[in-house]
Image: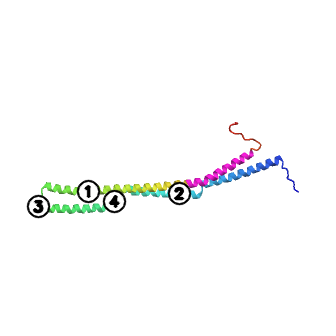
């Protein structure tokens, strides 16, 4: 009933060219989609949030690591206790000296004891400060590692969503270019 129409060679070439153009357009759209994903708002918002977290972490670290420990309430309370103890000892020493007639050597020995109390207190405060700084360093390192892991995860997720689009788009464009080269035989690298 119907006979197969014999399409001429020129019509085949026009159809092949049209097919190549459509394939190239599809590849271009897919490539555009991949590049658009690269600069997507979701990635930008997540990166901004991560940058804000990193800035807040650095501010926390500077505030907690470099603050003056002697201004802390615990250190001030310890110094106040020592000051009160030294004041009380000094009153007792003066009263004892007035009643007993203490020699200068005994007075110097009691002052030496008072200085030893101050030295012990400062040593304890210094060791507490070292322990506090080590704790702040450890917490900061843990937080930085967590933020770096989140950054890597964000970058990998963004890259894994972009790569298929870019590769697919480039593949379609390559197929479109190969389709335009009709009538030419491809040479293998060994023939060149």
The 10 Å Cα crowd at callout 4, few under 14, some 14 to 19, many 20 or more, is few
For marks 4 and 1, give the one nearer the viewer.
1
Residue 33, given in percent of the width and then of the height, sits at 65, 54
Q: Is residue 66 something one can see in this rendering?
A: no
Which of the labelled discs sits on residue 59, or is there none? none
Position of 52 with respect to 131 (left or right) is right
Left or right for 35, reference 184: left
Q: Give coordinates of residue 152: x percent, y percent.
A: 52, 53
Crowd around label 1: few <14 · some 14–19 · many ≥20 (10 Å): few
Q: Is residue 173 magenta?
A: yes
Give the Cα distance between marks 3 and 4.
40 Å
Total of numbered circles in the picture? 4
Sequence-wise, the earlier of marks 3 and 4 is: 4
Residue at horizontal 16 percent and vertical 61 percent from the top: 94
* Residue linked to disc 2: 48
Residue at 30% in and 63% down: 77
**Gap in angstroms between the C-alphas marked 2 and 3:** 75 Å
Relative depth, front residue between 15 and 109: 15
- Callout 3 touching callout 1 (CB < 8 Å): no
Residue identifier under label 1: 120
State which region is magenta.
156-180
**Residue that carries the numbered disc 3 in the rendered image:** 100
* Location of the C terminus (image quadrant): top right
Q: Please say whether residue 142 is visible from this viewpoint.
A: yes
Q: Find numbered disc 2 in the image and state the secondary structure of the residue it sits on.
A: helix
Q: Are marks 2 and 1 in contact (CB under 8 Å)?
A: no
- Front-most of residues 187 and 114: 187
Residue under pointer 4: 71
Figure quadrant of residue 185: top right
Instruction: From the viewer's side, name the closer residue of 145 and 32.
Output: 145
Q: What residue is at 58 percent from the left and 59 percent from the top?
A: 42
């Amino acid at each position: 009933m119907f006979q197969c129409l014999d399409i001429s060679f020129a019509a085949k070439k026009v159809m092949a060219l049209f097919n190549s153009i459509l394939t190239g357009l599809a590849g271009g759209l897919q490539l555009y989609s991949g590049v658009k994903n690269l600069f997507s708002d979701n990635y930008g918002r997540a990166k901004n949030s991560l940058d804000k977290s990193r800035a807040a972490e650095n501010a926390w670290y500077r505030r907690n690591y470099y603050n003056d420990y002697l201004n802390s309430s615990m250190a001030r309370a310890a110094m106040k206790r020592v000051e009160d103890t030294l004041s009380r000892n000094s009153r007792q020493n003066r009263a004892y000296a007035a009643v007993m007639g203490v020699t200068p050597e005994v007075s110097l020995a009691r002052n030496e004891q008072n200085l030893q109390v101050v030295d012990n207190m400062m040593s304890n405060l210094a060791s507490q400060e070292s322990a506090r700084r080590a704790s702040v360093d450890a917490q900061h390192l843990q937080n930085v590692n967590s933020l770096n892991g989140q950054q890597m995860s964000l970058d990998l997720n963004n890259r894994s969503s972009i790569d298929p689009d870019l590769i697919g788009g480039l593949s379609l464009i390559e197929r479109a270019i190969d389709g335009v080269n009709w009538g030419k035989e491809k040479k293998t690298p060994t023939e060149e």
